[in-house]
Image (cartoon, helix red, strand yellow):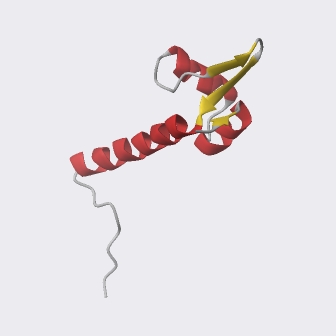
Amino acid sequence: MRLIRLKEVMQVTGLARSTVYKYIAEEAFPKPVSLGERCVGWVEDEVQDWVVAKIQERNLAKSAAGRPDRLRLAG
């Protein structure tokens, strides 16, 4: 198990610091683990699972709308 700091969370997710904390407050993002008085980290697997869930939501939305996942080229 690996803990990652905010900078890496932002790189992995593409979210800004304020958005990460907003999603945490909304219980829509993994909660950080306290590492000290003013230091937190996130469980890397939990952040990766969140990203995968977002991808799956996107794919389900495409399927529900009847849009193909890939463009087909005429050949």
> Which quarter of the rendering shows the C terminus?
bottom left
Name the residue nearer the viewer: 56 or 41.
Answer: 41
Q: Residue furthest top?
A: 37
What's the residue at 48%, 16% (across, down)? 26
55 w.r.t. 26: above or below: below
Location of residue 41 in the rendering, given as x and y in whole percent from the top left corner: 67, 27
Q: Is residue 45 left or right of residue 69?
A: right
**Residue 68: which quarter of the image?**
bottom left
42 w.r.t. 37: above or below: below
Location of residue 62 in the rendering, given as x and y in whole percent from the top left corner: 30, 50
What's the residue at 22%, 46% (across, down)? 64
What's the residue at 69%, 40% (across, down)? 8
Q: Residue furthest front?
A: 1
> Which quarter of the rendering shows the N terminus?
top right
Name the residue nearer the viewer: 73 or 44.
Answer: 44
Location of residue 22 in the rendering, given as x and y in whole percent from the top left corner: 57, 19
48 w.r.t. 68: above or below: above
Location of residue 44 in the rendering, given as x and y in whole percent from the top left corner: 58, 38
Q: How many numbered badges does the structure rendering display?
A: 0
Q: Is residue 35 left or right of residue 28?
A: right
What's the residue at 32%, 60% (across, down)? 69
